[in-house]
Every structure is written in structure tokens, then in C-alpha cells.
Image (cartoon, rainbow, N blue to C red):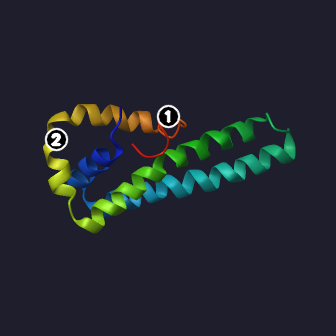
Amino acid sequence: MINLRKLAAVEMAWLGARIIVAEYAVGVVLPLVLGLMSIRSGLRGSGLFGREAIWGVWLVSIAANYIPLLIYAALIAKAGTAREEGEPEFAHAKRYRVHQVIIRTPSAKVLDNGIVT
């Protein structure tokens, strides 16, 4: 099971809080906007099961995966505990790289035990 708080902390300890919070914010906003635009376009043109609508649902579900990461990153940044939480996990860096790929799978984390783990 992916611990999203640890994943956010590891990335923040490695790359810095500002970069990761910005990355996660873009990871929520950009796919959400593009997904909603695609869904709208798909529903106007070829109906519910059009290519654009399916692409839009996929993008919106990716945005949903980034919401808890953004929340955890903001909480960790506010508390200033990125190094304390993230550095002990550096030994497991390979596992966290795999977790990043899983996050990009539509709804993988949102459907796994709800939004917060």
C-alpha cells in the first residue's frame, strides 16, 4: 500500500518543498482543466463514449490522484518537517519511484481505500 504522506515527504526532502508543492498543484489543476474541456468536447461531438470524453475522464482521474498528495505536501511544508519525515525513507527510494508511476494510473489511489491513506 502506498503511503502518500511518506511519498510527498521523500520528494520534498530530495527536491525541496516549493518545487514539490508546485508540481502537485500543477498535477491537480492542469489535468483537471484539460479533462473537463475534453469531456465537454466529447459530449458535444460524439456522445458519452467518444474518444474525447474517455480521454477527459482519464485526465480527471489523474487529477484526483494528485489531490491527497497536494494536501500532504502543503501540510508538511507548513509544519517544516520534510527532512525529518523524508530522509529516513531514502533507503527505500526505488520503491517510491514505482509509487510515482502508480499515482499516474487513473484512480489507482483514489479507489484504493478512499482518498486518504
Secondary structure category for the residue under label 2: helix
Identify whether 94 is placed above or below 65.
above
Identify whether 71 is placed above or below 105.
below
Residue lying at 39% horizontally and 61% vertically, measured from the top left? 22
One can see residue 37 in this view? yes
Tell me the mark number nearer the camera, choosing from 1 and 2: 1
Local packing at callout 1 (Cα closer than 10 Å; few below 14, some 14-19, many 20+) is some
**Viewer-proximal residue, 115 or 87?**
115
Q: Which percent across, then down, holds residue 80?
A: 22, 65
Mark 2 — residue?
Answer: 90
User: Mark 1–mark 2 contact, CB under 8 Å?
Assistant: no
Q: Which percent across, then down, holds residue 45?
A: 86, 43
* Amino acid under disc 2: Phe
Name the quarter where the C terminus is drawn.
top left
One can see residue 23 in this view? no
Residue lying at 81% horizontally and 38% vertically, measured from the top left? 48
**Viewer-proximal residue, 78 or 43?**
78
Q: Which percent across, then down, holds residue 31?
A: 57, 50
Mark 1 — residue?
Answer: 108
Name the quarter where the N terminus is drawn.
top left
The image quadrant of residue 55 is top right
N-terminal of the pair, mark 1 or mark 2, is 2
Q: CA distance from mark 1 to mark 2?
A: 24 Å
Local packing at callout 2 (Cα closer than 10 Å; few below 14, some 14-19, many 20+) is some
Q: Which percent across, then down, holds residue 38?
A: 71, 48
* Amino acid under disc 1: Ala
Residue lying at 70% horizontally and 36% vertically, measured from the top left? 54
